[in-house]
Image: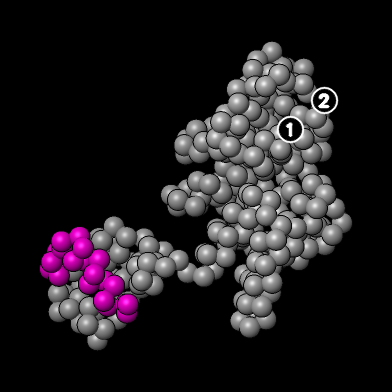
Amino acid sequence: MNFGATIKKIRKDKNLTQKELSDGILTRSHLSQIETNNYFPSYDKFFLLLDRLNVVFEEFLFIQNDQKMQFKQQIRSKISEAANLNDTEKLKNLAITAKDLHEKTEDITYYHYMLICKALISYNMTHTVNDEMIKFVNPIKEYLFKMDNWYLYELKLFNNIIYSLTVEEALLFSRTSLKRLDNFQYFMEFQHTEQHIYLNLSTLCMEYEDFEAAKYFAEIAIEKAKKYTLVYEKICSEMNNAIARIKLGEGDKAYEVIKKNMLIINYLEFENLHKHFSKFLKKFKIEVDV
């Protein structure tokens, strides 16, 4: 579907006349020319039209692409899915795909996706941060350090590599990332990214046995999960917070929180999440009768 046809389709789907859509933005005749691909509006006019249609730019591209997700989004989504499932074979195939695409297009996004896949594969083999994983993440760290300002892409990159950083590096990066996140608070992607950063910072601090910091970040992560109604993330954040509180000697109700959430994890059949927290509980010598 071409540009003008997409505008026309959305307008008709929403039962708007050309006059209703164009009023105060451009002339009706100009809109008619846009819809027949004989005239292209300036960026400001285009976004005013999208605003009146109550359609965001990403949704417009999705409709224009015959309701198919753009390939960059597809591969990013597949990496996230494979990471959550600890699917090493899928990550290997995605790493090959990303490498081929980077060589063909020289698009740095695909290079970063390849590195993230390889880092995740390395982590899945030992379930610990290792030298090989750090080697794959280092180019992304260098890329982020060079940026004067971060946008959503850089924020998501940071979120993907938190586990491979030292606590000092993570806190240094997080000062930049969390400050920038305020600029994107009305974006849908912001909600997940913000919560995940706090959750991942909490998990990283747990790995380094900095339980005070782990508790602090987990508390913020819990509030963000509640605010954005993120059920899976709320469970993870509550588990981190409870483990940290037990290690700090504040475990009066924390054992019950762990027991409740492990039962929920079982009920929802989150097998990989159950394995993750079972290892965490064993690592920190916490026994809970589930």
Q: Residue at x 76, y 52 (%)?
A: 124
Neighbourhood count class around disc 1 (C-alpha, 10 Å): few under 14, some 14–19, many 20 upward: some
Residue highlighted by disc 1: 278
For the point 47% across and 37% down, the residue is 229
* Amino acid marked by disc 1: Ser
Q: Is residue 249 visible?
A: yes
Residue 277: x and y in percent read 71, 34
- Identify the image quadrant of the N terminus: bottom left
Give the image location of residue 76, x and y in percent.
Answer: 57, 62
Q: Is residue 78 above or below residue 279?
A: below
Question: Label 2 amino acid?
Answer: Lys
Outermost residue on the bottom side: it is 38
Residue 138 located left or right of residue 270: right
Residue 184, how many percent across, how many down? 49, 52
Depth check, front residue: 42 or 221? 221
Taken as a whole, is the magenta stretch helix, strand or loop?
A: helix
- Which residue occupies 22% across, 78% down? 35
When the figure is inspected, residue 61 is found, relative to residue 226, above or below; the finding is below
Query: What span is in magenta?
Result: 1-20
Q: Position of residue 211 (x, y in %)?
A: 76, 30
Residue drawn at (78%, 44%), measured in percent from left and top? Answer: 167
Quadrant of the rendered image containing residue 150: bottom right
Residue 211 visible here: no
Q: Which residue is mark 2?
A: 285
| Magenta-colored stretch includes residue 38 | no
Q: Earlier in the sequence, mark 1 or mark 2?
A: 1
- Under circle 2, the secondary element is loop
State the image quarter where residue 23 is shown: bottom left
